[in-house]
Every structure is written in C-alpha cells, then in structure tokens.
Image (cartoon, grey):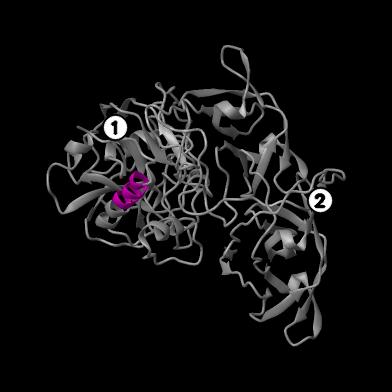
Amino acid sequence: MKKGSAGGSPARPGVLSEAAGEPPALLPERWHSAFCVFALCLGAFVSHGQTKSTSTPEPIETKPIEFVLDVKRSSETDLLLLRNGDKLTGALQNETFHLRTAYGNLKFDLHLIAGIDLEGSFFSHESVVTVNNNRFSGYLEEPSFVIRLETGAQTEVRKEKISKVICRMRQTELATAPKRQAIRLRNGDLLTGELLGDPLITLPNNTRVSVRPKETDTLTIASGKSPRALVRLRNGDLLQGLLETEDIDVRLDLGMQVRIYHGRIDTIEFQDAPVLSNGELAQIRPANASDPISPTNPGPGKNPPGMVWIAPGTFAMGSPPDEIDRGLDETLQAKVTIRHGFWMARFEVTQSQYQAVMGTNPSHFTGDSKRPVEKVSWHDAVSYCTKLTAMEQEASRLPDGYAYRLPTEAEWEYACRAGTTTRFSFGDDSGYARLDDHAWFTGNSGSTTHPVGLKRPNPWGLYDMHGNVWEWCLDHWSSSGSNERPEIATRRESALRAARGGSWLYDGRFCRSANRDDYFKSNRCSDVGFRVVLAPLEP
C-alpha cells in the first residue's frame, strides 16, 4: 500500500550472490527489432588529437529520429528555439560543429546532428544529439548559428540566445553495420561503438580475466581509488573485482575514436543489437523468419535484444521487521525458489513499442516515444502480452510452450534484487543519498516520467526497476505476498492486482525492492506501466 517519506543514516553496499544456471538453448544468434528497422549512422571526423574516419560506409535506408530534446523534428526546416520564446525556422548554414568533450575533440558534419542543447551555454555545458541517438556533452566552439529564414533573409544568432537547435529529418541518413557496445557515462552521455581491446579485472582470488564482448552482457563500474567492476556474463554468471584498465578506447559508430577514463563510465552494454536509429531500444524478434526459435535450433547463452536472462534460484523475498520505512503490507523475509529461468525486458515497455503492437498510445506524458507507456490497465498490459505472443507465434518465432506475459511478484522482486538482500539493489541507502543515481522519484522527476534507461541499471542489467513508473505484476493482490508459480499467482479471482517498483509520483521509500502496492485491474494511472517476461508456460 502507499506510504510516506524518508530519512536516515549512511548507505552500505549491497550483498551480491552469483546466479546459477544457463538459459535454455532456444534462441538463434541473430535477432532484429520487433517494432522497427534498426540502423546506426556514420560520418563525421574527430580526434583525441586529430583522427579521421578511414572508410566511407554504404548508405542504407533508416528511419530518422522523430523527436529530439522533447521537440518534434520537421522534414522541411531546421528550428532554432530562442531563450526569449521566439522560434526561427529555415536552413542552417553552418556546415560543421566542433565540441570539446572530456574524452576527445569532436567534429560533426551538420547532417549527422539531430539536435543541440544549449540550455547550459552560460556554464559551458552543451550537448549534441546525433542522428543515431548518441549524446555528447562538452563545450561547443562555434560562437553563433547562421540560418537562412523561410523568407529568404539570412541571420546570425549568438548561441547564448539559443535554447535548443532542432535539425531537420532526412528521408535517409547514413548508416553502417551496428557495433555491439553501448557506453553510458555518469554525466548522462551515451556513446555506441566498438571497444578497442578488452578491459581487464582482477577477481578476489587474484586471477586476472579479460572482459570479452561475445561472453559479456554488461560491465558496471563503481569508481574510486580502487575502481570496482561488476560483470554480468551472458550465461547469467556474475563476476566482481577490481578494474585494471584505466582508459577505455572506443571506435564510435560515427567513425571517430575516443579515449574515456574509467571513472567517467557508468555501464558498458555488450548488446546483440544496438540503440536504433529512431532513438528506440532494440526489442524482441529474430532476424529471419526462416530461423524460428525451437529446441532443435539452439543458441546457448543468447539473449533476445532488449531482454536479460534471469537464471532460476532461491532468494529471500520480503523485508525484515527492522527495515527502514517497511510497510505493513510487506511480508516478512522468507526463502522463495524460482523454479524456471526466464527472460525479462531490460526496460519498461515504451510508448513506441506499445503503439507498434496495440495501435494506440494511451499515455499522459507524450512527446518522447522512449518514455514508458502509462495509463494502461492490468487488462491492457495482459492484452499486449497476448497480442505480442500471437504475432510471434504466427510468424513461427516462438517455440511451443513459450509466451510473453507479466512477471509474478516473486519473479519481479527476484530480478529487482539481483542477488542482493539490502533495501535497494545498490545498497541500504538509509538516507536516500544514492537513490537519485538509480531512480526517478518525487525528489528528482519534475512530476513527469522520463525516457527509459537513463538511470543506472541494477547488478543484473535491468533499468528502472526502482522508480519511473509502477509495474503491473501478474498476481492478484494478497496480503500474504506472492507465490512464484504463475498458475497459482492468478488462480484466485480478485479485483486488485499487484504493482512494484515505485514511480515518479512517490517518495524514495516506495522504490525499495520489497515495497508492494495494489490497484484495481481497471485502473489507468499516469504513473503505472509494465515490463514483460518471456517464459515457459506452466503445465
């Protein structure tokens, strides 16, 4: 149930346990998005000193980003949004832009830019968003923008007078074969490309191991005098140790090469499919209908893009009686066994994903298709899973006995905790000092949802398990908690269903791993959404 606000003492690190088990050999190696064609763009020159791209990619068809910086892009004109509220439309005359960043001096051709954020110009903090949805922050060297207005007149505007620059959409934008890594920095920047060399970590037994992209799902870095690394392998195993590699060299999909100090990196995602060229995140679907998922077409250790394998195991569900801000509807800690492994979506279902399957977008907070869908009832969420399953079965892309559905409460908490026993997946954080890095809640949300995946993931690579929107669970509401078995979780009829994770509308205490809430199945709230799992059907 809903409770109130918080305070307390210093946080202590979470306790991590290694997950056992490997995903069943059911998935083919090659996948593509269920909802749109992916592609990443190429071009531009840059150097840490001065480095140029040495090859010219072959152009391919790609869908441009429709919204950038929460503004819809036009296919006809560029747009300057001025600080005084005026708007200038026309054609930008600047051919290139130079951005000084902490990891290199970047040179962008105009056609590679989707938008420029100049809100922080007075403090030398500006950002460039590229047509492949990368974000780079730094200091823009150009003092002004020249635009030829629709009237034919040409004018020059100082950057200090500009809030945002929105570049026009083009029917085709240069793209190249996608790389396998997405590097998320602590300042919010996102870079996609290919690591040049494998990072090294030293395990507690003093063994040095290389982090190899083909074997790794995510690498999360906690900076400090002795930087700690948490590695989640694709088979579900977890490794933690000291990061030995100080600088990470990356060849970006834009053709440039940069060097990033480890302390600036939050997470590196070694994905089978990258961020899409329309700004969406890769999601569930095989690349070829002739490669159906089946036990006779194995792909050991492979995850569908956008999904994380959750191995079976046992965990302590609920909260101890002395947990700070514990709710009366939270069950006392007890061992629960997850009998079958399953895949869980890395992100909450976005508005564009929901639109693609259901044909509608009921959300209150629109303007960015990467925001989680909300104002969906429990029935709506179940219908989405049912329709997605039918679509994939009709295309012979699911094995018999597998389906998309909502997670049970037990599955949700097991995945949220990710091997930890603390209040949050990142530690107890009794004073809520670290929650801002991991969740959107009332203290930082600005009373709105935010695009998925902007905060730090939990140890198993799942984003927004704390905050952003509440997530529907399969279970009927029960004051005694949830059983992990789906057929039992839904057996008793009830008008109430469980929701987990907290939201942008509630205090930090609601984001705790054990916190529970209930809603009528027909409720449609602007802070309630969902994520899906792909799992075997119970007998």
Q: Earlier in the sequence, mark 1 or mark 2?
A: 2
| Closer to us: 289 or 13 | 289
Q: What x and y, as percent, mark residue 163? A: 67, 70
The residue indicated by pointer 1 is 317
User: Which secondary structure type mostly characterizes the magenta part of the structure?
Assistant: helix
Q: Amino acid at mark 1?
A: Met
Task: Give yes or no for residue 389 being in the magenta stretch.
Answer: yes
Q: Please identify, in this view, whether the residue under mark 1 or under mark 2 is nearer the observer.
A: 2
Q: What x and y, as percent, mark residue 57? A: 74, 48
Q: Secondary structure at mark 1?
A: strand
| Closer to us: 532 or 28 | 28
Magenta region:
385-394
Q: Quick check: 144 left or right of 74?
A: right
Q: Secondary structure at mark 2?
A: strand
Q: What x and y, as percent, mark residue 195? A: 69, 34
Circle number at residue 45? 2
The 10 Å Cα crowd at callout 1, few under 14, some 14 to 19, many 20 or more, is many
| Closer to us: 32 or 513 | 32
Q: Is residue 394 above or below residue 127?
A: above
